[in-house]
Image: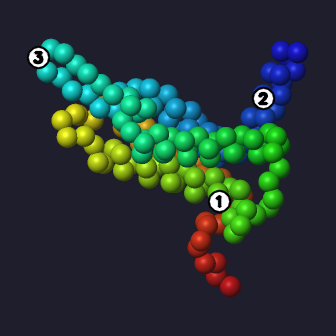
């Protein structure tokens, strides 16, 4: 049974394109970075920090959108779910790109807004890079599918 599951996992990795792998990898690194310190403060030898899950809704919502894009990629490529060729005006790859881009925007806004008395920490910078990787992976996947960017007029 374990051998069969192992073979199935490797076969599933073969179904992922390079863009899909970058998107999913970015989402995994983003998940890890949510547990690292995003903000920290030191005073008189004492240090306090807040992780990505502690700093508010924008970071959590950004993580949730990037994770939704990665889950959609994995489920679609494993053929666990079947999606129509278009979802409204978008292909599934374009929807994954939009989810990742919206998630990256929320995380980037949270990083730029910051906190009044707290210093930004390494977890925040890692999460910005990881969310940017999900967007790059989504763009690569759209390019590989040759479906074009969403909401961009194509030359007739």
The residue at the point 30 percent across, 25 percent down is 49
Q: Which residue is mark 1?
A: 94
Left or right: residue 119 versus residue 104 is left
Left or right: residue 147 versus residue 53 is right
The residue lying toward the viewer, choosing from 2 and 66, is: 66
Residue furthest to the bottom in view is: 156
Left or right: residue 10 versus residue 136 is right
Q: Nearer the viewer, mark 3 or mark 1?
A: 3
For the residues labelled 3 and 1, the Cα–Cα distance comes to: 50 Å
Q: Which residue is mark 2?
A: 10
Label 3, secondary structure: give it. Answer: loop
The residue at the point 11 percent across, 16 percent down is 44
Q: Residues within 10 Å of mark 3 (few under 14, many from 20)?
A: few
Residue furthest to the front in view is: 57
Is tag 3's residue or tag 1's residue first in the polypeptide sequence? 3
For the residues labelled 2 and 1, the Cα–Cα distance comes to: 26 Å
Is tag 3's residue or tag 2's residue first in the polypeptide sequence? 2
Whether residue 126 is visible: no
The residue lying toward the viewer, choosing from 107 and 23, is: 107
Q: Nearer the viewer, mark 2 or mark 1?
A: 1
Q: Which residue is mark 3?
A: 44
User: What sort of colour scheme is used for the picture?
Assistant: rainbow
Q: Position of residue 116 (x, y in %)?
A: 20, 40
The residue at the point 62 percent across, 44 percent down is 68
Whether residue 110 is visible: yes
Q: Position of residue 15 (x, y in %)?
A: 78, 41
Is tag 2's residue or tag 1's residue first in the polypeptide sequence? 2
The residue at the point 65 percent across, 66 percent down is 148
Label 2, secondary structure: give it. Answer: helix
Q: Residues within 10 Å of mark 1 (few under 14, many from 20)?
A: many
Q: Nearer the viewer, mark 3 or mark 2?
A: 3
Q: Position of residue 114 (x, y in %)?
A: 27, 43
């Amino acid at each position: 049974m374990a051998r069969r599951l192992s073979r199935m996992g490797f076969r599933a990795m073969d179904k992922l394109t390079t863009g899909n792998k970058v998107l999913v990898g970015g989402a995994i690194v983003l998940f890890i970075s949510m547990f690292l310190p995003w903000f920290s403060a030191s005073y008189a030898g004492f240090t306090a920090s807040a992780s990505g899950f502690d700093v508010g809704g924008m970071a959590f919502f950004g993580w949730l959108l990037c994770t939704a894009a990665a889950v959609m990629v994995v489920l679609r490529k494993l053929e666990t779910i079947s999606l129509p060729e278009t979802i409204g005006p978008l292909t599934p790859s374009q929807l994954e790109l939009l989810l990742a881009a919206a998630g990256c925007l929320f995380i980037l806004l949270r990083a730029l807004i910051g906190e009044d008395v707290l210093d930004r920490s390494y977890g925040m910078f890692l999460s910005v890079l990881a969310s940017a990787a999900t967007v790059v992976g989504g763009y690569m996947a759209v390019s590989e599918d040759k479906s074009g960017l969403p909401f961009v007029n194509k030359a007739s």
